[in-house]
Image (cartoon, grey):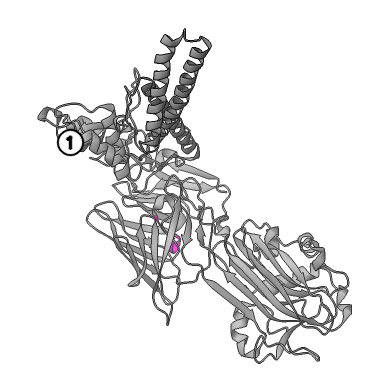
Amino acid sequence: MDNLTYTYQANSNKLLTVTDASNTSTAKLGDFNDGTNTGDDYTYNGNGNLISDQNKQITSISYNLLNLPEKILVSGKGTINYLYTADGRKLKKTVVDSTSSPVKTTVTDYIEGLVYERDTLRYIIHEEGRIRPEYDSGKALVYHWDYFEKDHLGNVRVVLGDNADTSVYAATMETASSVTENALFSNIDNTRTALPAGYPTDETTNPNAYVARLNAESGEKIGPSIVLRVMAGDTLQLGVKAFYKSTAASTSSTTTSSMLAALIQAFSSSTISDGTHAAAGTNSVISSAYTSSEYEELISKDADENLATKPKAYLTYVLFDDLFNMVDDNSGVKQVQGNPDELQTLTVEKFLIKKTGFVYIYTSNESGENVYFDNLVVVHNRGPLLEETHYYPFGLTMAGISSNALKGANYPENRKKYSGIEYTSELDLDIYDAQFRNLDPQIGRWSQIDPKIENMEAWSPYASNYDNPIRYNDFLGDEPAEGGPGLWERLGNAVVQTGQQIVSAAAGATNAYVSNNLLGGGRIDVDNTGLIGGNAIAYQVGQKLGDAAAVYTGVVEYLAAGAGEFFSAGAGTALAVPVAIHGTTTAGLGLKNLLTNPIRNITLEERAAKLNEKDRSGKDFTPARREVVKEQNKVKNGGTMKCENCGVETPNAQKSKKGVTPPKNEAHVDHVKRKREGGRGNPDNGQVLCGGCNVEKH
């Protein structure tokens, strides 16, 4: 966790230095790195644009007329050059990385949503994610659909793929496959031995001349082993052949600490890493999290796989998540059992990975007797989860709990991250390239002055999201806007919507019941209510309930009238007859309406068309027509109401309060063709404007 202190120029918003009281530059987590520089960390040009950052070793940044960076020079690392359209849309990015030999140049071209790297199409961005071509030598080109799951601020949190591929890893121990198997597994060559005497025929491979010999005293404790990066939703299936000759293998001749040391040694050569999380090394799970107690608990957790009379030899699989916690549901052992001189198969049926992390799969023998393993097979079925990203408030990735599947060089990692802005990590730049300026997520500030500074005079022109990134986002880098509804707001909206539907149903039930009792008078059809969608359906359901209630009360009324006449022996005929007639008519009308008038879904288009039928030239909008204009605007803008002139988000106007100035962006429904010019007060002549544009128009 960073502990940053900011120092500014006197009487200015320009940042001079940032220091970190808990600098963690060696952790390589992408957070702020307090350099060893002296003097000011940051300098600016006459337009207020950042031109040097000593903490990132940026010695110079040149800008175009739009205050967008054209060339960034990073000392000792290389350069990044940008090319833009006249309105500031990025066309090309050229990265010259001088830290590699030979110098590596990568050119990325942007053509609307198409992104090319070194003249090869990498992906096509669209509203729901991207289309990603897969290039595999000797195979036909295949396109995959990757879907982005976003939070209410537009931050891409999850990337889901449409293809589930399968990888099969096999350690056959045969010399012909040595190169491949040594690249995938540990302890292949140093455990390989010829088949022992009495080894049964195994037709898994042809030939089958070698096996792995394990012996805790005179050989290796750990045999063929593999570590895999797995994502939640993947599945694994394991199998291995085992053979032993002596029942003395049931006695352990080593210690837990020795077994763990052998494990660390076995996996020490692994280079598997997703950038932040590594499978081996000083800070890896196997080195720091797999303790003696966990090792022993894993061996003993299933009594059927820890029989005292059987060999102390196992096929083990243990999953650790990215927080170094062992996932018990995805960890276990299979003990070598059976009888001496019998070939047996240890299998772990397909199981679902519960958490993203690293799974370590290995064979082992704690005894001083030979136990042989052969043909270890691991089947890895990858699920849809490709990437999972978590953020600190101003866009810095929480590297410790973020993850991605290891898909190889052919898989381009998603760069559309915080607020859906492209992230540039080359040369350790670590900034977001918005359309109008660049955001440094390590310190939560923009590198250029806000292009719409006149709209936010109370805020620093370098501040991000009004210093409230939980509520606001700024996809373009020009002006923060409120994100979509959060959890509590969505719950509140659901409560409000449910309440509206209950009220609509009650109104429909009351209208139908009263109308039937008035012999059909006063019935209001749903078309004349102004209701649409769920509220319209609720109203019609309510009417059906009112009709059913009218049938019931009409029948009761009729029976009551007859009973009254019977018990009064004709004396109550004058009263009973009209009551019976009313009850019969009410029940009949209720039954007729109940069996007819099918429930219809009133769409927004139908409602608008209905309200457009009446000519309202030169008149104001009625409340119903005003709401339809707003709903049409929301549909057009993906659920958010926006000004049709300037594009700013426009919340509903609140009730005016004395002494309180309404916000400039509140929504106003206005005529497209002016009312005084004969413009209709109908939805087909309506538009939503923010307060500022509405004032300018008038």
Count of numbered badges drawn on the protein: 1
Whether residue 684 is visible here, answered yes or no, is yes
Is 94 on the left or on the right of 171, as rendered?
A: left
Q: Residue 380 versus residue 564: which sits nearer the camera? A: 564
Is 230 on the left or on the right of 554, as rendered?
A: right
Is 475 on the left or on the right of 231, as rendered?
A: left
According to the picture, the residue beneath numbered tag 1 turns out to be 672
Residue at x-position 52% and y-position 52%: 390
Magenta span has 72?
no
Give the image location of residue 582, x and y in percent: 39, 19
Is 188 on the left or on the right of 438, as rendered?
A: right
**Outermost residue, left direction?**
677
Whether residue 693 is visible here, answered yes or no, is no
Give the image location of residue 11, x and y in percent: 38, 36
Give the image location of residue 595, x and y in percent: 39, 36
Magenta span has 423?
yes
Residue at x-position 68% and y-position 75%: 239
Q: Sort mark 1 into few (<14), some (14-19) or many (20+) by Cα contacts within 10 Å.
A: some
Q: Residue 580 versus residue 315: which sits nearer the camera? A: 580
Against 640, is 167 above or below? below
Against 272, is 515 above or below? above
Which quadrant of the structure image shows residue 360?
Answer: bottom right
Q: Amino acid at mark 1?
A: Val
In the image, the segment drawn in magenta is 422-430
- Quarter of the image with the C terminus is top left
Residue at x-position 61% and y-position 69%: 228
Give the image location of residue 29, x and y in percent: 54, 57
Q: Secondary structure at mark 1?
A: loop
Which quadrant of the structure image shows residue 506?
Answer: top left
**Outermost residue, front direction?**
569
Against 192, is 564 above or below? above
